Amino acid sequence: MVKKMGTALQEFIAQETSAGIVLFCAAVAAMIAMNSALSPYYLAFLDIPVAVQFGGLEIAKPLALWINDGLMAIFFFLVGLEVKRELLEGQLSSIEQASLP
């Protein structure tokens, strides 16, 4: 049973659409939490302080700011890598293909 679940999870992760499905489900769950009786708990969760400290340097922000700043930077980095891959070897690698994608 555990091996079947592991294999199914590996197959799901291998699909190109898996990240979009997870992102969509997380957005729906956040909207449901924010518009229900769970709203105070959801807001309290987003206000949890998170700090990173190296010696005298400290960055302390609420979790919501870490999500907005950090995860969005990672997202746009990955989008940039995808565009670069398409320009080098994908659908946008030649003028003929890029003119009518």
Image (cartoon, rainbow, N blue to C red):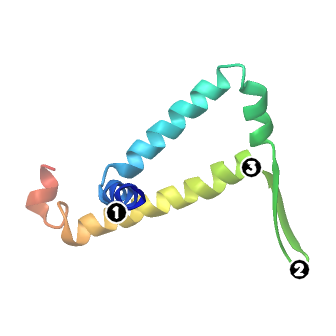
Q: Gap between marks 1 and 3, in whole Å?
A: 27 Å
x and y, in percent, of residue 90 in the image: 19, 65
The residue that label 3 is drawn on is: 63
Determine the image quadrant of residue 8.
bottom left
Q: What residue sits 80% from the left and 37% below the top?
A: 44
x and y, in percent, of residue 88 in the image: 24, 72
The amino acid type of the residue labelled 3 equals Leu
Between discs 2 and 1, the one toward the N terminus: 2
Between discs 3 and 2, the one toward the N terminus: 2
Q: Nearer the viewer, mark 1 or mark 3?
A: 3
Task: Please determine whether, in this image, residue 33 is positioned above or below residue 44.
Answer: above
User: Crowding at label 3, few (<14), some or many (≥20) Cα neighbours within 10 Å?
Assistant: some
Asked whether, in this view, residue 72 is left or right of residue 9, the answer is right
Q: What residue sits 64% from the left and 28% below the top?
A: 33
Task: Please determine whether, in this image, residue 81 is positioned above or below residue 50.
Answer: below
Asked whether, in this view, residue 35 is left or right of residue 57, the answer is left
The residue that label 1 is drawn on is: 82
Residue 55 is labelled as 2
Residue with the most extreme bottom position = 55
The amino acid type of the residue labelled 1 equals Glu
Judged from the image, the secondary structure of the residue bearing numbered disc 2 is loop
x and y, in percent, of residue 58 in the image: 86, 68
x and y, in percent, of residue 40 in the image: 79, 27
- In the foreground, 40 or 80: 40
The amino acid type of the residue labelled 2 equals Gly
Between discs 1 and 3, the one toward the N terminus: 3
Q: Are marks 2 and 1 in contact (CB under 8 Å)?
A: no
- In the foreground, 98 or 82: 82
Q: What residue sits 41% from the left and 62% below the top?
A: 80
Q: Gap between marks 2 and 1, in whole Å?
A: 36 Å
Q: Which quadrant is home to the N terminus? A: bottom left
